[in-house]
Amino acid sequence: MRSLWVRLTAGLVLLLALSCLGVGAATWVEMDRFLVGRLDQQLTESGGRFPASLEHDRWPDDAAHAEPDARGQAEGTFCARVADGRVTGGWVVRGRATVVTDLAADDRRTIVALAVGHPRTVRLARLGEYRMLAVRGRDGDVLITGLPMEPVESTVRRLLAIEGVVFAVVLLAAGAGAAVWVRVALSPLRRVTAVASHVAELPLSGGDVALPGRVPATGSGTEVARLSAAFDRMLGHIETSLVRRQRSQERLRTFAADASHELRTPVTAIRGHAEFALRRPGDAPEHVRHALRRIHAESARMGDLVEDLLLLARLDTGRPLAAEPVDLTRLVLDAVDDARAAGPDHRWTLELPGEPVEITGDEHRLHQAVANLLGNARVHTPPGTSVTARVVERPGEVAVEVEDDGPGVPDELRGEVFERFVRADPSRSRRAGGAGLGLAIVHGVAAAHGGRAELAAEPGRTVFRVVLPR
Ligand SMILES: Nc1ncnc2c1ncn2[C@@H]1O[C@H](COP(=O)(O)OP(=O)(O)O)[C@@H](O)[C@H]1O
Ligand SMILES: [Mg+2]
């Protein structure tokens, strides 16, 4: 069964139906016993007067032609006489007279077997059910009086029919009433559910902190009201912590942006000075020149890192990027040209559609993303690896794919490769790769364009894909 509402209503109606059945059964049994008891009383009180009239003085010798006196006897009253263990005759009152009734052999046996003084219910073949009482007559024979059970049965039937109708009406009314009542009682629960499912739909991880909708207080101290109140407090707590998280994230972002911005100038200065000194080393000894070369190389690396950090910080603030027409085919072509020049030991392949593919976006950032993917395919694979760059058009989207047949992304990185500072064994990649920000930038740029970055890896084939909406 579906809802609590249906279950509770059905349960109530079922209980009520069981009670009705109980009441019905009890009244049936009690009524039957009462009416039969009354019949017995009538039989006892009549004391066999009806059959006793058979022993009337009119026919002292000719018992066979005797006829009982029907005066004062109710319609359907039965009488019989048993002499010497045989039924001498049976009569029934019809109208004002008595009518001789045929008794089947079974009926005769049943009548003879009646114990004197104990009323019993007996079924006669022609007459139906009778309540019969045997009394001893004056001349030693047994006199039987019987009253029909039919009025008792019809009264009980009528009572049951009335009860059935009344119970049906009561059940219907109670069912409808219970349905309405349970619904009203559970309505705060429905509101809690509505708010809960609404909140569950909210993209809470996305930094949204407004939790719209509260459960309206219902006042009374029922379980449902307490649940609503607790749920309400919980929403409040969640909102507070979301606001706190949001603030600290904002602080962190501002800090990262400010820090990288502040670092930019001194790093550029160090690099400039090192370059200047290297161009005019004068008579500086070789070890000083070596140190200068290291300073120059490391400050260049640091400059790249600062630029990456600054870019990520900017992407984080959600500031809109440039929205200009970008020829993706051209962009990929140029990027592969650069990669080919940087990695002559790799085999570079291009797969481009016949027509130029143009989208709207930030050309500079997109170039950087594609260059990062190509750079990874060069840096994280051994020489001789084949790298294929392609632009794939799909309905509503364009994908830029960079595929290589190198060793692939290490298993432990696969799930989080687009996170910041995630990279293979740092000691190895210190020389080979960067700080682990390349793919984070790819992901950030794709997201800023309303697209996504994906990794599809299978043995011998690593595909990084940037999907952009058209
Ligand atoms: N084409 C690739 N083949 C194998 N591993 C890769 C490839 N591209 C990226 N990776 C793995 O993903 C890690 C993260 O890449 P990235 O974010 O660009 O950081 P970085 O290149 O600075 O190490 C790399 O350190 C490398 O282990
Ligand atoms: Mg990289």
Image (cartoon, rainbow, N blue to C red):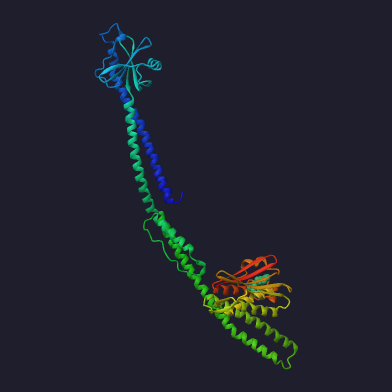
Name above or below for residue 337 compared with residue 31: below
Instruction: Point out residue 162 in the picture as x, y percentages from the top left corner.
Output: 32, 36
Using the rendered image of the protein, determine whether residue 409 is visible from the camera's viewpoint: no
Specify whether 333 is left or right of 19. right
Q: Is residue 403 left or right of residue 365?
A: right
Give whichever of 167, 284 is nearer the camera. Answer: 167
Residue 4 versus residue 351: which sits nearer the camera? 351
Q: Position of residue 204 (x, y in %)?
A: 50, 66
Residue drawn at 73 percent across, 76 percent down: 345
Total marks in image: 0
Seen in the picture, residue 317 relative to 41 is either above or below; the reply is: below
Query: Which quadrant of the structure image shows residue 355?
Result: bottom right
Position above or below: 282 against 302: below
Q: Residue at x 63, y 69 (%)?
A: 417
Please tell me in which quadrant of the rendered image residue 314 appears.
bottom right
> Relative to 314, is 48 on the left or the right?
left
Corner quadrant of residue 259: bottom right
